Image (tube, rainbow, N blue to C red):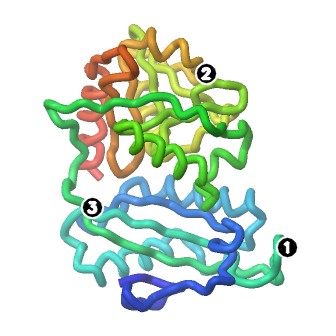
Amino acid sequence: MLNLNGTLVNTATGQLSINNRGYAFGDALFETLKVLDANILFWEDHYFRLMASMRILRMEIPMNFTMEFLEQEILKTVEANGLSSQAARVKLTVDRGEGGKYKPLEQVVNYNIAVEALDAPMYGIADHFNYTIDLYKDFFVAPGLLSTLKTNNKITNVLGSIYAQDHQLDNCLLLNTNKQVVEALNGNLFLVKGQTVKTPPLADGCLKGIMRGQIMDFITKDAHLELEEASISPFELQQADELFITNVITGIQPITNYRKKSYTQEVSRALLTKLNAKIRLA
């Protein structure tokens, strides 16, 4: 079941118009959420990021778009799909309605909610696995505020994903136009060297990730680690002890191989333990 502006419709029959601005112009934002036993993880962070992003895109936020209203709509959709007692992935999308060319005909905001089941309730890392990445250099991310938003304009991520598949890679890292490493195709990047954990700044064009914020908070509170928010050059990847990717669905994904370099997982596994402990207390 899909939720289209509050109405539950069958997934097979629910559809958007070809004049929908999210489809026609990428004039839309989305949040990818993890729901566990009818609890939206990090919901407050997601909600305020969505509101801030809508303001940046000059969307008129409807009066009923309160945190409580959207939470109820999400959980209503989760329940309608029979997933209230397990883990679910939710995609909440808001768009600027229909009509117009680049300039909208009117200030309207629509929303839709799609849900699918997740296999594992808690975050985990397989004991025996290889996760191989490389740089994607065909196209680059533009540094700046718009690149930090979760908009429907994700063609670079799409092309990078096809590149990864064609080259038998698990993921790729994106570069910005200044040739700095920005993020992975599906999450933020962290680099560990000694006791320093480094992640690119938002000014470089990386997504303002919800899990990124959680992990940065854990690192800041750890007396044995030092957080550095600074640009990462491709050269630093070869010198790192660890690399890992973060997003709200996977949690923490350690990278095991980049070209001829192999990495350890000590810090990423320790952070994962803290992350799961926080979720259990929620």
Report the residue marked by disc 2. Answer: 230
Report the quarter where the N terminus lies: bottom left
Q: CA distance from mark 3 to mark 1?
A: 39 Å
Q: How many neighbours does mark 1 have within 10 angstroms: few (below 14), some (14-19), or many (20 or more)?
A: few
Of the two numbered discs 2 and 1 on the same chain, state the one appearing first in sequence: 1
SS state under label 1: loop
**Alpha carbons under labels 2 and 3: distance apart:** 33 Å
Q: Secondary structure at mark 2?
A: loop
Q: Secondary structure at mark 3?
A: strand
- The answer to whether one can see residue 180 in this image is yes
> What is the x, y in percent for residue 240?
42, 13
| Residue 69 in the figure: left or right of residue 150 | left
Q: Position of residue 35 (x, y in %)?
A: 32, 62
Left or right, 128 with reference to 138: left
**Residue at 26% from the left image edge and 26% from the top image edge:** 270
Residue visible at 68% across and 73% down in the picture: 24
Q: Amino acid at mark 2?
A: Ala
Q: Which mark is residue 103?
A: 1
What residue is at 34 percent from the left and 30 percent from the top?
132
Q: Which residue is mark 3?
A: 36
